[in-house]
Amino acid sequence: MPLVAAAVCPHPPLIVPELAGAAAPELDELRVACDAAVAGLLAAEPEVIVLVGGGPETARFNSADYGSLRQYGLDRYVRLWKVNCAGGERLPLSLTVGAWLVGRSRTELPRLARSVAADASPAQCAELGAALGAQSEPRTALLVTADGSACRGPKSPGYDDPRAGAYDDGVARALADADAEALLDLDPSLSAQLKAAGRAPWQVLAGAVRATGGDWRGELRHHSAPYGVAYFVSSWTPA
């Protein structure tokens, strides 16, 4: 499937306003950036949107599968595309939030999804990405949902780690420059120590872009760490 555009968004449950409640305005800028990234995907006129996110295992999902936000305090199901009897509640959080972001656009384009295991090696991630980017049809837009380090300050989920800032700055540069090789060079061990859930999905993106070939242009739309977790929003397009 020829890759015509890609985007990276984070997947905090609080990005859903109804779940965040009174704290919803704190992530308004992030939502605006994510909406713009999804709009950028649609502007490339894809025929299908493929979502990639981290999960407990590497898996392929049925377009009728769905996720739930119940365990985060909101009794809501989020469909990947069209729910029918073949689907099930299978999507991990990353893909549930990704499906929610795409759903906000009101597009009716078909959607597929892949999860990648947190412990997948860079080579395995690149291979998965290459399988997405090397086919001849249909025109595909890739939405990667991935968080950065979770060690940005003493109140962060992973507590404070002085290495986290430099790690996230490196990711931000790679996303801004559409630097696939820099993403593939991310160290799995360090990423795990910093609780960077996005390492494997970013490397799937890198593998897809490398397999597609040509020059790519990146745009970093957002970079913040409001709750001690780094959030990035980026758009990649063929140059």
Image: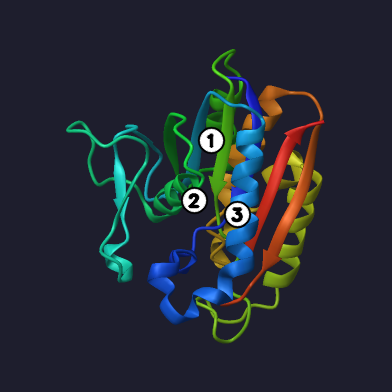
Q: Quadrant of residue 147?
A: bottom right
From the viewer's side, name the closer residue of 72 and 76: 76
Q: Which residue is mark 3?
A: 34
Tell me the residue at 28%/59% (across/down): 76
**Cα separation between marks 3 and 2:** 7 Å
How packed mark 3 is, by other alpha carbons closer than 10 Å (few <14, some 14-19, many 20 or more), is many
Amino acid type of the residue that numbered disc 3 sits on in the rendered structure: Cys
Tell me which amino acid carries mark 2.
Answer: Leu
Residue 216 screen position, x and y as percent: 78, 33
Callout 3: helix, strand or loop?
helix
* Residue bearing mark 1: 124
Q: Residue at x 62, y 30 (%)?
A: 208
In the rendered image, which residue does mark 2 sit on?
101
Q: Is residue 234 toward the left or the right of residue 90 in the image?
A: right
Expressed as whole percent of the image width and height from the top left, the position of residue 226 reads: 61, 76
Q: Are marks 3 and 2 in contact (CB under 8 Å)?
A: yes
Locate the C terminus and report the quarter of the image it occupies: top right
* Residue at disc 2, secondary structure: helix
Tell me the element at label 1. Answer: helix
Q: Nearer the viewer, residue 195 or 91?
A: 91
Residue most extreme to the top: 136
Number of marks: 3
Q: Tell which circle, 1 or 2, labels the residue nearer the N-terminal end.
A: 2
- Give the x, y percent position of residue 9: 58, 53
For the point 79% across and 54% down, the residue is 173
